[in-house]
Amino acid sequence: MRKPDPSSGNNIDNNNKKFRKGLWSPEEDDKLMSYMLKSGQGCWSDVARNAGLQRCGKSCRLRWINYLRPDLKRGAFSPQEEELIIHLHSLLGNRWSQIAARLPGRTDNEIKNFWNSTIKKRLKNLSSTTESSYDPNNKEIAGFTSTTQHYQHAEFMPMLNSPSPSSMQETVLNTIIDRLPMLEHGIMNMPVAGGFFNGAIDNNKEFYLENGVFGSVNFGPEGDMFVPPLESVGTTCDYNLKVENACNNIDTNNSYHNSCNNKIRGENIRDGVENLFQEELAMGEWDLEELMKDVSSYPFLDFSS
DNA sequence: AAGACTCACAACCGCTCGATG
DNA sequence: ACATCGAGCGGTTGTGAGTCT
């Protein structure tokens, strides 16, 4: 924490006005809080000026978002929140704002700090533990306890530092779904390292990958999607049957996909998938460039081939 | 009791991106 | 096409508080 710096006149705006830096005083908090409650958020530099604060807009924004906002949840993270953060981080990486968006009342800064100070350390401990004696049946490792059936992260944490092919697929899958809000279920393909991701999600929220990996998808109360830990992901090679079932489910249960389904019928699922893929592109809901940019940020994905 | 060390977290910094002129 | 500005994001720093020796 920083001391309020009375001499902090080193920040100067365009009008040669001096900005305070450092810790916020209770008086400044009061001013900002009452202004925000009264007038709402506008241009932040206006907020700073109109609230009578000698702060830059950026500083006001940060203070409001990270500390003063009335909907903030204060206090320690619950075990459920902890598990969710770990799970989301395994899917999204250091995209703190996206992670925070899935944790009501928590800020990206808070989560980032929590991750860097607490979770990172535990993961480090875990990795040293797992190097010598990793027990996949042990639900309590390095201070973590497993409290929900969906986030028994102890089992999949080893993938965080060196993602396995399965975690890669999981990540790709989630990125796809994240980018396709209209496609709660669907069949899709996309290039990944060494070939194409080909998979399906059916109405039972199960996903199937061409290499035979399959598992289930869960949706939280906010509609957020969670993929369970990998121990629940099977490795059957009966991909064709699974895809067939997925097609059938999509066909009979989903009106949106009923309209698309003619395109994904037939012997060659890949052709159908490509047709569907093209249609999604045409509808503008699938931003491939954006998706690829997104996915390519994962160091373990190689799109050079 | 006091100094050293560690932890947690508020706040800053630099950068990118989109909107606007 | 370019410059400017505001907003937002992720990385990093600095420091008060707690703990250890």
Image (cartoon, coloured by chain):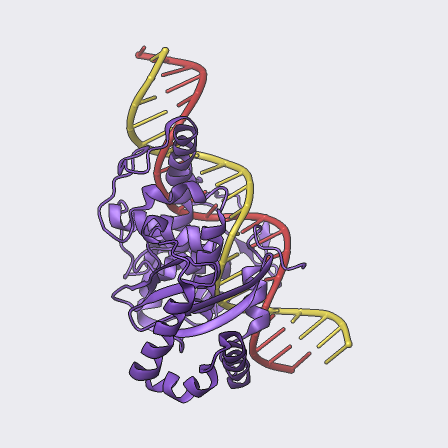
Chain colours: A purple, B red, C yellow
Q: Name the residue: 48% across, 72% down.
A: A188
Q: Is residue B15 left or right of residue A242?
A: right
x 42%, y 60%: residue: A98
Q: Position of residue A121 (x, y in %)?
A: 41, 34
On screen, A197 above or below A251? Answer: above
Nearer the observer, A169 or B21: A169
Which image quadrant is residue A294 in? bottom right
Image position, residue A285 (x, y; %) = 49, 79
Q: Position of residue A181 (x, y in %)?
A: 40, 74
Q: In what quadrant of the picture does the C terminus of chain A appear?
A: bottom right
In front of the other: A57 or A265: A265
Place residue A13 in its image quadrant. bottom right
Residue A297 falls left or right of residue A219: right
Along the line of sight, which residue is nearer the eye, A6 or A123?
A: A123
Q: Residue at x 58, y 52 (%)?
A: A11
Quadrant of image for the N terminus of chain A: top left
Horizontal and vertical percent position of residue A186? 41, 75
